[in-house]
Image (cartoon, rainbow, N blue to C red):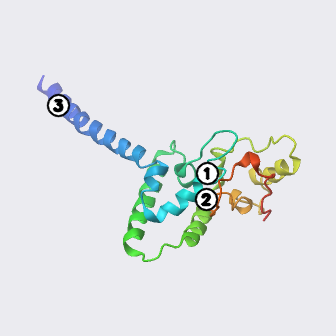
Amino acid sequence: MKRIIKPLIFIALGLAIAFPLFSLSYYAMVRTSTPGFCASCHEIRFAYNTWRTSSHVNNAHGFVADCMDCHLPAPQHTFDFFYAKTFHGIKDVIAHFTQTEYDHEENRQKAYASFANEQCQKCHRNLLHIPNKRGAMLAHRTVVYPRPGYEKRCVDCHRDLVHNARENYQYKQYQPSYRGLGI
């Protein structure tokens, strides 16, 4: 009987400790994954304001892509997501206390250099069916199915959609058709 009770006590104790720790960690991750939280740092305020004026917030579909959608791996990749979120958080805190001048353009270029196509394709899934825009469809086909040696990233052409200073909100439905940079 003692052989059964001792492991059960350890299992119950493990659950009693692990469940609250997991719940608190998950709660902290959810609360710190909002644009409002990102904007609480004065260094990120510029990125937050330029994001709010972009078509990633103001579009005819009513869809909003927030900071986490672009800057972190998909949440179903749990380990990569937690690692990237922790890394970015620590990096931003260190930058806050050690840098005297925050260079938005330099950090923007670093972010673009780190983007993978999968981050864009989390939201932009149906790139090969763009009615009435054959050129865009063909351009996207070269990204989705690249020939060896001709790989491209989404941000090679779509570099200036977000985090550019604008005086007015950019509503996509009122803009002329977007033409990528074609790099």
| Residue density around tag 1, few if under 14, some if 14–19, many if 20 or more, within 10 Å | some
User: Looking at the image, which residue sits at the far front?
Assistant: 167
Of the two numbered discs 2 and 3 on the same chain, state the one appearing first in sequence: 3
Residue 179 marker: none
Q: Are marks 2 and 1 in contact (CB under 8 Å)?
A: yes
Q: CA distance from mark 2 to mark 3?
A: 47 Å
Q: Residues within 10 Å of mark 2 (few under 14, many from 20)?
A: some
First reached walking from the N terminus: tag 1 or tag 3: 3
Identify residue for label 3: 9
Q: Nearer the viewer, mark 1 or mark 3?
A: 1
Q: Position of residue 117 (x, y in %)?
A: 66, 53
| Residue located 23% across and 32% down the image | 11
Relative to 26, 139 lies left or right = right
- Judged from this view, the residue extending furthest toward the top is 1
Q: Are marks 2 and 3 in contact (CB under 8 Å)?
A: no
Name the element at disc 3. Answer: helix
Q: Amino acid at mark 1?
A: Gln
Q: In this orientation, which residue lies closer to the viewer: 143 or 55?
A: 55
- Asked if residue 57 is positioned above or below residue 11 in the image, the reply reads below
In which quadrant of the rendered view does residue 91 lie? bottom left
- Quarter occupied by the N terminus: top left
Question: Residue furthest toward the bottom?
Answer: 100
